[in-house]
Image (cartoon, helix red, strand yellow):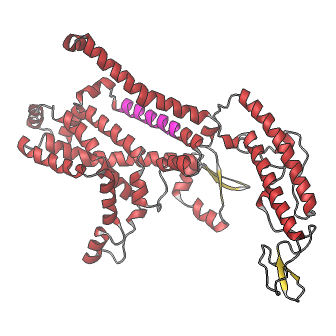
């Protein structure tokens, strides 16, 4: 800090510090706090007041439908030359002309009615939202009489039952709203959804086939898949999370294997005037929008794409290869998409290595692998760490690549799960919990990686 003040002056350094603090506050801290608040907030539709309010709405809807049904059933059938009058139930009564005249209920108010979903849901025997394995019912929790609209009762009795349910639900909703307004809505329930087991319906043959798979056996060993007398359960959220992390690590490792030789070639094994052309070859494709580059890969890996057509023409294969079903295809496209984030940090550090050290190592008899292991890689360690961290974070958060390349033919990545929670299933609270937990896990992995690499934050200053 003293050197900065001496070089740039107190005013400029203060302005720079304020800009950094504002950037960190607005773009990092505040969004994460907002995400954490949403993650700790119980979704409104899971509150007891929301359940009773929905019960009240269902009961009133049931009443309206039954009253309309009853009025139409009791109305005299029109006589218009024996023409049939369409109705819901298709039941018919004889007309004066002897022709069948369809009616809605097929008779008076005491006869059977068609199925009505809202009437079926109008019951005080509703299951409340609680923890996994915990069964709590509305009538037991709030000491309500057990009422339900039975289609076997006369229509008038069904209406009276629905009206009684609506009255009780309305009163209870107001009481619960007042109680919930005074209570804190913060809990860890949304995070618990990440580890909640889900029943997987399988036949005996399917269960045997699934249990024979090595991946499922590994999931069983780490507790993400288990079997009880009720069936097979999987912690789908955790499975998706771990699979995505493994894929992201694998994509990062593949990117390092591909990019390290490129960085070495450009930085140390090529004259400067030729290195410029090599870098242009890397940078020019990235002048195209990322989505366009990803969609371009679909024309390469499609069943009738360039790659399959070439192999069919050469007689290598007899039928198109389903590249969209292979996780390796996603890895390759991720490496292609984020290759510069791995190459540039390694190149920047590697280019600061004195080439005389390389010549000295060779004069002392060091082989090429030993030269890299003892001289080049230790010097390039900060660049390798930065490149791996950047590529891992981008791969872990990748959404467009797995979605476009796999087209739903592969297991989804965790970023897709978070997207679905926010925008498709409207579970933004659970999506926020997934997102916040995912961020913490990724930061933990980065910290462990830095510890393994024995890299400190100040070492990153060498990456310039």
* Place of residue 320 in the rendered image (x, y in percent of width and height, measured from the top left): 36, 73
Q: Which x, y percent locates residue 462?
A: 23, 27
Q: Is residue 427 above or below residue 299?
A: above
Magenta stretch secondary structure, dominant: helix
Give the quarter of the image for residue 105: bottom right
Q: Is 398 left or right of 52, judged from the image as shown?
A: left
Of residues 45 and 339, which is closer to you in this image? 45
Q: Quadrant of the C terminus?
A: top left
Q: Is residue 443 visible?
A: yes
In the figure, 278 relative to 347: above or below? below
- Residue ranking furthest to the front: 80
- Vertical side of 120 occupied by 46: above or below: above
State whether residue 162 is above or below residue 324.
above
At 73% from the left edge and 55% from the top edge, which residue is drawn? 230
Tell me: 342 left or right of 329: left
Q: Residue at x 54, y 32 (%)?
A: 36
Position of residue 246 in the picture relative to residue 73 (left or right): left
Residue at x-position 49% and y-position 54%: 412
- Tell me, yes or no, whether the highlighted magenta stretch contains residue 47: no
Q: Which residues are magenta?
A: 435-452
In the image, what residue occupies the spot 14% across and 38% down?
366
Pinpoint residue 14: horizontal percent, then vertical percent: 30, 14
């Amino acid at each position: 800090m003293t050197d900065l003040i001496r070089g740039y002056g107190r005013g400029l350094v203060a302005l720079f510090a304020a800009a950094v603090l504002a950037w960190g506050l607005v773009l990092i801290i505040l969004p994460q706090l907002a995400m954490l608040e949403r993650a700790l907030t119980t979704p409104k539709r899971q509150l007891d007041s929301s359940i009773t309010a929905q019960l009240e709405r269902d009961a009133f809807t049931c009443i309206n439908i039954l009253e309309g049904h009853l009025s139409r059933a009791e109305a005299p059938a029109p006589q218009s030359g024996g023409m049939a009058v369409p109705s819901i139930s298709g039941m018919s009564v004889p007309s004066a002309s002897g022709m069948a005249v369809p009616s809605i209920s097929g008779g008076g108010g005491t006869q059977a009615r068609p199925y009505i979903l809202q009437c079926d849901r109008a019951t005080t025997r509703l299951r409340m939202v609680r923890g996994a394995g915990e069964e709590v019912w509305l009538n037991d929790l709030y000491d309500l009489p057990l009422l339900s609209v039975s289609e076997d009762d006369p229509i008038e009795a069904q209406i009276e039952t629905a009206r009684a349910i609506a009255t009780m639900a309305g009163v209870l909703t107001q009481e619960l709203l007042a109680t919930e307004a005074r209570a804190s809505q913060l809990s860890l329930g949304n995070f618990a959804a990440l580890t909640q087991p889900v029943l997987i319906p399988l036949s005996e043959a399917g269960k045997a086939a699934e249990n024979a798979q090595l991946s499922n056996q590994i999931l069983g060993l780490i507790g993400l898949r288990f079997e009880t007398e009720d069936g097979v359960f999987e912690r789908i959220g955790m499975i998706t999370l771990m699979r995505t992390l493994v894929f992201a690590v694998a994509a990062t490792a593949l990117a390092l294997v591909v990019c390290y030789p490129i960085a070495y070639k450009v930085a140390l094994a090529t004259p400067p005037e030729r290195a410029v052309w090599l870098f242009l070859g890397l940078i020019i494709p990235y002048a195209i929008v990322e989505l366009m580059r990803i969609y371009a890969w679909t024309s390469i890996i499609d069943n009738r794409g360039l790659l399959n057509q070439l192999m069919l023409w050469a007689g290598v294969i007899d039928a198109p290869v389903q590249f969209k079903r292979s996780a390796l295809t996603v890895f390759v496209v991720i490496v292609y998409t984020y290759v510069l984030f791995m190459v540039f940090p390694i190149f920047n550090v590697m280019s600061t290595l004195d080439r005389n050290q390389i010549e000295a190592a060779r004069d002392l008899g060091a082989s090429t692998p030993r030269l890299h292991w003892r001289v080049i890689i230790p010097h390039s360690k900060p660049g390798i760490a930065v490149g791996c961290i950047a590529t891992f974070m981008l791969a872990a958060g990748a959404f467009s690549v797995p979605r476009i390349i796999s087209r739903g033919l592969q297991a989804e990545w965790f970023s897709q799960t978070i997207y679905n929670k926010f925008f498709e299933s409207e579970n933004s609270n659970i999506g926020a919990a997934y997102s916040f937990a995912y961020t913490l896990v990724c930061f933990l992995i980065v910290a462990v990686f830095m510890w393994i690499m024995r890299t400190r934050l100040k070492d990153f200053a060498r990456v310039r």
